[in-house]
Image (cartoon, rainbow, N blue to C red):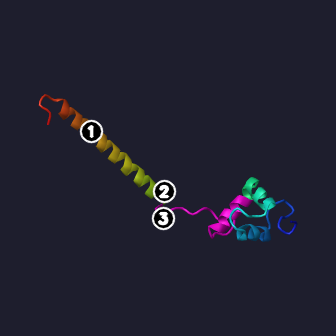
Amino acid sequence: MSALVDARGCLTPAGMAALQSAPVGQAPAELAQHVATCPRCQARLLAASAGRPPGAPPRRDALGAAGRLWRSVAFMVAALVLALLALVVIGWLQRPGGL
């Protein structure tokens, strides 16, 4: 296994290739056990499976932070409008004679 693990104990490129080419659930036990306990190798494996070079920052969604903020504000406004509408309807129903 020395060709698959470097001096620090992390997977070499050959070790990564062996792990990625193995069928699901049938990876070499030593490699799978190492990846399960090594955050560095987990990050490298995830980056490789996402098609990014190792060490590249994670991708942001297309809308970015401004889009997420806008969605949150829109959701809050909609929730407030629905709550106020519910209060108005409850007020109408409690009046004598109803709607």
Of labels 1 and 2, the one closer to you:
1
Where residue 80 sits: x, y (%)? 32, 42
Residue for badge 2: 65
Residue visible at 26% across and 35% down?
87
Residue 8 in the figure: left or right of residue 39: right
Q: CA distance from mark 3 to mark 2?
A: 9 Å
Nearer to me, 64 or 8 = 8
The amino acid type, in three-letter code, at marker 2 is Ala
Residue 39 in the figure: left or right of residue 60: right
Q: CA distance from mark 1 to mark 2?
A: 32 Å
When asked about the image quadrant of residue 79, the answer is top left
Secondary structure under the numbered disc 1 in the rendered image: helix
Q: CA distance from mark 3 to mark 1?
A: 35 Å
Q: Quadrant of the C terminus?
A: top left
Range of the magenta residues? 41-63
Where residue 20 sits: x, y (%)? 71, 68
Residue for badge 1: 86
Of labels 3 and 1, the one closer to you:
1
The amino acid type, in three-letter code, at marker 1 is Ala
Nearer to me, 38 or 80 = 38
The residue carrying pointer 3 sits among few (fewer than 14), some (14 to 19) or many (20 or more) residues within 10 Å by Cα, namely few
Residue for badge 3: 62
Q: Quadrant of the N terminus?
A: bottom right
